[in-house]
Image: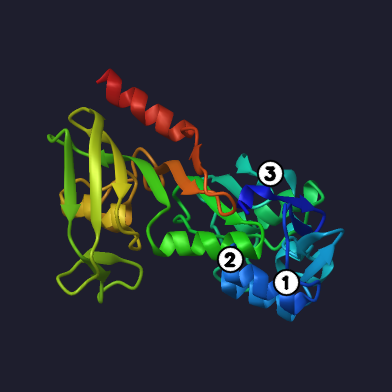
Amino acid sequence: MRERQASRRGEWLELELEQFGAGSHPHQLRQWLLARSMFPAKWINRLFSIGGIRLREGRIQLLAFPAVKPAEDELYRAAMRMELEHAVPVLYEDDYCLVLHKPAGMPVHSSYAGQFGTLDQAAARHLLNVGDPLAVKHIHRLDDDTSGPVLYAKNDLAQFRLDEAMREKRIERIYLAVVEGYVSKKAGVVDQPIGKDRHHAKRRRVSPNGEKALTRFEKLAANDQWSLLRLRLETGRTHQIRVHMSYIGHPLAGDVLYGGADRALQHQALHGETLLFSHPLHGDKIVVEAPRPSWLHAFAKRIEER
């Protein structure tokens, strides 16, 4: 069976099988599924434990899309209070994945009890609005002041597979950044380990004892004051772009934490441009692009005009 032969029917994922030779008991169905490695074994076993595997009209059904009860879920309770000004654009959506365009200044998740106005809450609010309250969870994060696409899983199957893809570095994120000064190279690589800064709790720094970190950059435009770069990460360390650009003498505009000036922008000039991942059900490559925000358009114009 190919996984693209599976379709959603309410809370259930139904497998369109041409032949099925096992019995109808959930244990037999589980063993049949595990033997064919169709889905993660951990997910199949969890479904079995909650009665989420059944046979209906000759087709196996899996409880892949259980609805959340909003009034009983902390995230959804917060989402129900959100007003329209907290809405964020949807860049991609299907039954398994949701990609939201996070604006600069919005945190992805709560960092303290009762925090309001997060992207997680906006994701839940969107699902409430479309009448499909699923257990949505972010797969990766962006700094509060970084804009760009953030990927969410809308069910456990998607989360299992997308989390695995993140660990194996099969989800690619491409960024645009405005850095201070004229970058002379057309392209380059910064291969320097990153660790915590023991003198500053929020900072990271290049450190021989840190974790491996590699950033590739390409110059798109430059003048004597700023340079516009496209960056690709081969690792995902905290503040990696900010640390590496500061290390080579070109901190991000607006990034006062790492030596940048905030005279032209009140947050670091970093935007997620493109997100690439394999779909968690059928494996097709998904490419999601996030439009440039107004502050980046303004910077690009100023760089080109000088």
Q: Earlier in the sequence, mark 1 or mark 2?
A: 1
Q: SS for tag 1? A: helix
Camera-side residue: 209 or 155? 155
Residue at 58 percent across and 65 percent down: it is 36
Of the two numbered discs 3 and 2 in the rendering, the one whose residue sits closer to the viewer: 2
User: Counting other residues with Cα less than 10 Å from the Cα at mark 3, is it few (<14), some (14-19), or many (20 or more)?
Assistant: few
Q: Residues under labels 3 and 2: Cα distance?
A: 47 Å
On the image, numbered disc 2 is attached to which residue?
36
C-beta proximity under 8 Å, tags 3 and 2: no
Residue flagged by tag 3: what amino acid is it?
Glu
Residue flagged by tag 1: what amino acid is it?
Leu
Q: SS for tag 3? A: helix
Query: Whole-percent x and y of residue 272?
Result: 43, 43
Quarter assignment of residue 143? bottom left
Drawn side of residue 263 relative to residue 76, left or right: left
Camera-side residue: 58 or 115? 58
Residue at 73 percent across and 61 percent down: it is 20
Query: Whole-percent x and y of residue 80?
Result: 78, 57
Q: Is residue 104 in view from this perspective?
A: no
Residue at 37 percent across and 47 percent down: it is 268
| Res. 85 mark | 3
Query: Whole-percent x and y of residue 251?
Result: 24, 48
Residue at 57 percent across and 49 percent down: it is 282
State which quarter of the image contains the C terminus: top left
On the image, numbered disc 1 is attached to which residue?
29
Q: Residues under labels 1 and 2: Cα distance?
A: 11 Å
Drawn side of residue 191 relative to residue 281, left or right: left
C-beta proximity under 8 Å, tags 1 and 2: no
Q: Earlier in the sequence, mark 3 or mark 2?
A: 2
Of the two numbered discs 3 and 1 in the rendering, the one whose residue sits closer to the viewer: 1
Drawn side of residue 255 relative to residue 53, left or right: left
Q: SS for tag 2? A: helix
